[in-house]
Amino acid sequence: MKSSEMLRAARVKIESGEHDYTCHALRAACGADAEDLRDHILDLLGPNISLEGWLARVHGVRSPRQPSYFKASIRYRERMRITRLAWIDHMVAEFEAKGD
């Protein structure tokens, strides 16, 4: 299966709310076939294990984690889901441009 196809399968799982993280969604959608793609994504994230960590390190975006920010946390999670979907779309376009 092409990387772009695996990412599309993972996107469905994230968009539906079944999974929050790209690598988890890839594993659920494609199993061991997605290991190389998961490794590639982890390389893109550098020392971070999630897009949230990368955004915090590179752009200073912080997650509201205290209970008093519950509503802000819900908005943050929705924004992260939208951001993650856009990132997947970007990766799909990159892989398709390379024929993968």
Image (cartoon, rainbow, N blue to C red):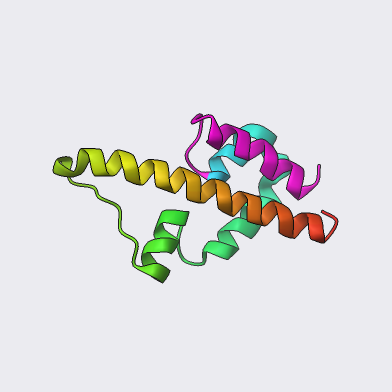
Residue 77's place in the image compared with 49, above or below, is above
Between 28 and 6, the one lying in front of the other is 6
Residue 87's place in the image compared with 56, above or below, is above
The residue sitting at 25% across, 44% down in the picture is 72
The residue sitting at 73% across, 60% down in the picture is 94
Q: Is residue 50 visible?
A: no
Furthest residue toward left = 68
Q: Magenta segment: does it hold 12? A: yes
**Image quarter (top left, top right, bottom left or bottom right) of the N terminus:** top right
Residue 19, position in %: x, y?
50, 34
Prevailing SS of the magenta stretch: helix
Between 83 and 46, the one lying in front of the other is 83
Furthest residue toward bottom = 58
The residue sitting at 56% across, 58% down in the picture is 42
Relative to 5, 51 lies left or right: left
Residue 90, position in %: x, y?
64, 56
Relative to 35, 80 lies left or right: left
| Residue 13: quadrant of the picture | top right
| Residue 11: quadrant of the picture | top right
Q: Magenta segment: does it hold 91? A: no
Labels in figure, total: 0
Residue 67, position in %: x, y?
16, 40
Residue 46's place in the image compared with 36, above or below, is below
Relative to 81, 28 lies left or right: right
Q: Provide the residue span drawn in magenta.
A: 1-21
Relative to 23, 76 lies left or right: left
Q: Is residue 44 visible?
A: yes
